[in-house]
Image: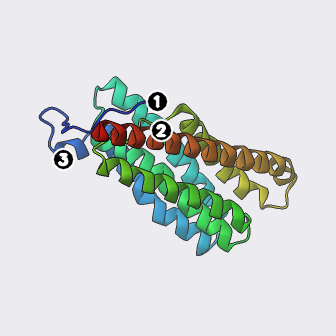
Amino acid sequence: MTKARSAETSDGDLSLARQLMTVPNLLSILRLAGVPVFLWLLLGPQEDGWAFALLVFSGVTDWLDGKLARLLNQTTKLGQTLDPAADRLYLAAALLAFLLRDIVPWWIVAVLVGRELVVGAGLLVLRRYGFAPPEVLYVGKAATFTLMYALPLMLVAEGMSTFAEIARPFAYAFTVWGAVLYLWSGALYVWQIVRAVTRSSTERAA
């Protein structure tokens, strides 16, 4: 997928303050505010039930802010930044807590964090060459969606009930498939970045 060169963009006459006050962005900010609470619930009192409820609430507001943004015609650049940022922060918080509590093996965390570092470095290279960030890929959305379902399932699977026994294989399956899709999307982003930088270097040398 090719990427357009970065340009100065704006959301019409909307200032940053006015963008913040739109309903979808307020929901995204509410989701972001829940991240430290989520992490504290997992690592402090280890109230997995409340952490699970907060994660479900985050998922509902994630779906709702996208719907409202389109319905109310309130799609903004700020919202396009806040929404994926909230997803990544919840994912990072859960991985950190799960690692410290020995719920997931260290190598899964290392692989997912490594993917983020590589893609992040690639985005810095793109910016240096004057390119805008690539559009979010469908496989990337699917990976995030799968991992966000894996997190509450992993919490449920930690219990000793019959429901926990049933949830455990689904939790592992979602985690593995989410990790595979996450790595695949990262590889696609890196390939796009390499193509864009190579093309740009060739054009400059011509």
Closer to the eye: label 3 or 2: 2
Q: Say which residue label 3 marks.
A: 16
Amino acid type of the residue that numbered disc 1 sits on in the rendered structure: Met
Residue 33 placement, left or right of 168: left
**Disc 3 element:** helix
Closer to the eye: label 3 or 1: 1
Height in image: 95 above or below 132?
below
Q: Are marks 1 and 2 in contact (CB under 8 Å)?
A: yes
Amino acid type of the residue that numbered disc 3 sits on in the rendered structure: Leu
Which residue is painted at 85% across and 57% down in the image?
A: 161
Q: CA distance from mark 1 to mark 2?
A: 6 Å
**Disc 2 element:** helix
Location of residue 3 (image quadrant)? top left
Which residue is painted at 66% across and 73% down in the image?
A: 100
Location of residue 41 (image quadrant)? bottom right
The disc label shown at residue 192, or none: 2
Q: Say which residue label 1 marks.
A: 1
* Residue nearest the observer in this picture, 53 or 40: 40
Percent x, y of residue 69: 34, 31
Percent x, y of residue 81: 35, 46
Residue 116 placement, left or right of 46: left
Amino acid type of the residue that numbered disc 2 sits on in the rendered structure: Gln
Height in image: 99 above or below 1?
below
